[in-house]
């Protein structure tokens, strides 16, 4: 096979693309990975990892200021934004090296540059050359959406990419958008002492989470000094270069407010234009690439995964889809793998953390399923008290007819880790009672809250008093 001919080419080296390339190579395919920027994509370079590294620093600072609550005296606690950013960059760079090593070790050809499909089985990468493939996996991801409220290069307006590389903190920050990215950013800046206001168009923060969880998080955010305005739309932003600030007006409010920086976290658009989809008859719905349950596009030799082809934009979903698409692209003669109906966990890394999966009562009702629920509050849990992290709760939902678990909401310490216990219960197909009978939750742990919430579904929780008659 000539150097420019591959069994499988993967376009985009984010968590979807590099996972697909590794899986295809391990299936014995001659594989190339085309990436225009750094390996690791949005997730590693501008998303999941850098935000969690920054949040970890802000959380450490916040925890140290609360040291006296543990009987520990700590004086003159301070931070260096430069060092916080450097730590984040070091983590990103180490992980990037790890991916480069994986690509090399799996004998994947790494082609650097912007790939553009030129025909049914061909792709060009700038000056580097033209390449042909038997199968192509598109994993081009997404980029931040910018509101047309201010000139694109305004020094006062940043998006999530720019927020990760600030050399100076603003004094007063407006975050437009109260989704996952907006609330994590707000938490980071507020813990470092920035006066933060979040404006969200929908009636609640975290619009894709249950309203009760969002309300609890909003009230905790208010305790941190974050002002939360939901059901509000920013109608006008004007720069005042002399004063070094922007004046922001909200629809329906008379008094404008001034901020020295505005962070827009209003969603993301998929990278599907300018990649030559039309040359290979790959259809989109105008927003994303259309795929079937095998991640095949309208061209059966071309697959698409991750942000560019999904309604839900999450790194773990992109890599999960990558495994399926790479299998299907590599093993055409065998039975194809299809999209799994697994519950996709949704995680928010604030303090306290938020995590959910599957169907809560609200979502189940919309799907015509009646549910029962079990609940346990972290303020009743020994381990949470010891950790001084007793805000929040676990709510687990089950089908009222079968008592099989349908989903959960968790607000509290390590919620993003605890949620996989609910996923395990869901895939086990056991009823809440059967699951509890088979599980022993270690004591004292946060997971005991899960055990009690599972048991509460059938009235079996030890630490929940029975209703008084
Ligand atoms: C601030 C922020 C925080 C986030 N936090 C989380 C989180 O905690 N957990 C989570 O699950 N998700 C998180 N996400 C979402 C997550 O980053 C994405 O869902 C994930 O990166 C999508 O993976 P992907 O492989 O589909 O695309 P991407 O990661 O976007 O990768 C696509 C890659 O393709 C490359 N590319 C595009 N077009 C071309 C081309 N024509 N030629 C060559 N290369 C090309 C791009 O340069 C990019 O590297 C976060 C996102 C942001 C912005």
Image: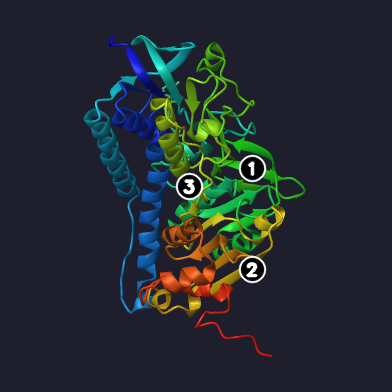
Question: Would the CB of label 1 be found within 8 Å of ligand 1?
Answer: no
Cβ atoms under marks 3 and 2 closer than 8 Å? no
Cβ atoms under marks 1 and 2 closer than 8 Å? no
Of badges 1 and 2, the one in the foreground is 2
Counting other residues with Cα less than 10 Å from the Cα at mark 3, is it few (<14), some (14-19), or many (20 or more)? some
Q: CA distance from mark 1 to mark 2?
A: 48 Å
Q: Quadrant of residue 242?
A: top right
Residue wearing tag 3? 170
The residue closer to the viewer here, 158 or 469, is 469
- The disc, 3 or 2, on the residue closer to the chain's N-terminal end is 3
The residue closer to the viewer here, 54 or 113, is 113
Query: Picture coordinates of residue 14 (x, y %)?
Result: 40, 33
Q: Quadrant of residue 103?
A: top left
Counting other residues with Cα less than 10 Å from the Cα at mark 2, is it few (<14), some (14-19), or many (20 or more)? some
Q: Is residue 57 above or below residue 391?
A: above
Residue wearing tag 2? 372
Of badges 3 and 2, the one in the foreground is 2
Q: Quadrant of the N terminus?
A: top left
Residue wearing tag 1? 247
Counting other residues with Cα less than 10 Å from the Cα at mark 1, is it few (<14), some (14-19), or many (20 or more)? some
Q: Residue furthest front?
A: 334
């Amino acid at each position: 096979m000539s150097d420019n001919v591959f069994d499988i080419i993967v376009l985009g080296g984010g968590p979807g693309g590099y996972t697909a390339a590794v899986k295809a190579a391990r299936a014995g395919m001659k594989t190339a990975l085309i990436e225009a920027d750094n390996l690791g994509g949005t997730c590693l370079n501008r998303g999941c990892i850098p935000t969690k590294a920054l949040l970890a620093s802000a959380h450490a600072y916040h925890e140290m200021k609360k040291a006296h609550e543990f009987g520990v005296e700590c004086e003159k606690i301070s931070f260096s934004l430069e060092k916080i950013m450097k730590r984040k960059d070091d983590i990103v760079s180490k992980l990037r090296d790890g991916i480069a090593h994986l690509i090399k070790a799996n004998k994947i050809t790494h082609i650097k540059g912007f790939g553009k499909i030129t025909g049914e089985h061909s792709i060009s990468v700038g000056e580097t050359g033209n390449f042909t493939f038997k199968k192509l996996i598109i994993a081009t991801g997404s980029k931040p959406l910018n509101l047309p409220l201010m000139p694109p290069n305004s020094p006062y307006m940043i998006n999530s990419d720019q927020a990760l590389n600030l050399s100076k903190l603003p004094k007063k920050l407006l975050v437009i958008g109260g989704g996952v990215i907006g609330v994590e950013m707000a938490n980071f800046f507020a813990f470092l002492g920035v006066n933060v206001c979040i404006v969200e168009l929908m009636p609640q923060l975290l619009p894709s989470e249950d309203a009760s969880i969002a309300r609890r998080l909003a009230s905790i955010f208010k305790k941190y000094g974050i002002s939360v305005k939901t059901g509000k739309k920013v109608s006008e932003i004007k720069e005042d270069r002399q004063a070094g600030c922007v004046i922001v007006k909200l629809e329906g409010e008379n008094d404008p407010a001034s901020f020295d920086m505005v962070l827009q976290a209003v969603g993301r658009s998929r990278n599907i234009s300018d990649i030559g989809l039309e040359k290979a008859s790959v259809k989109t719905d105008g927003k994303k690439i259309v795929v079937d349950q095998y991640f095949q596009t309208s061209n059966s030799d071309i697959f698409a995964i991750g942000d560019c082809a999904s309604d839900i934009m999450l790194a773990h979903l992109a890599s999960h889809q990558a495994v399926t698409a790479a299998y299907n692209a590599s093993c055409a003669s065998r039975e194809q793998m299809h999209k799994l109906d697994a519950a996709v966990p949704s995680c928010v890394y604030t303090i306290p953390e938020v995590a959910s999966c599957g169907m809560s009562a609200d979502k189940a009702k919309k799907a015509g399923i009646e549910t029962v629920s079990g609940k346990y509050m972290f303020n009743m849990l020994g381990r949470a008290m010891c950790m001084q992290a007793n805000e929040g709760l676990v709510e687990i939902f089950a089908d009222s007819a079968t008592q099989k678990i349908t989903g959960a909401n968790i607000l509290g310490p390590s919620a993003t880790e605890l949620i996989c216990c609910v996923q395990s219960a869901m895939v086990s197909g056991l009823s809440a009672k059967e699951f509890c009978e088979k599980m022993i939750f270690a004591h004292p742990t946060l997971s005991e809250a899960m055990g009690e919430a599972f048991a509460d579904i059938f009235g079996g929780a030890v630490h929940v008093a029975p209703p008084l008659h």
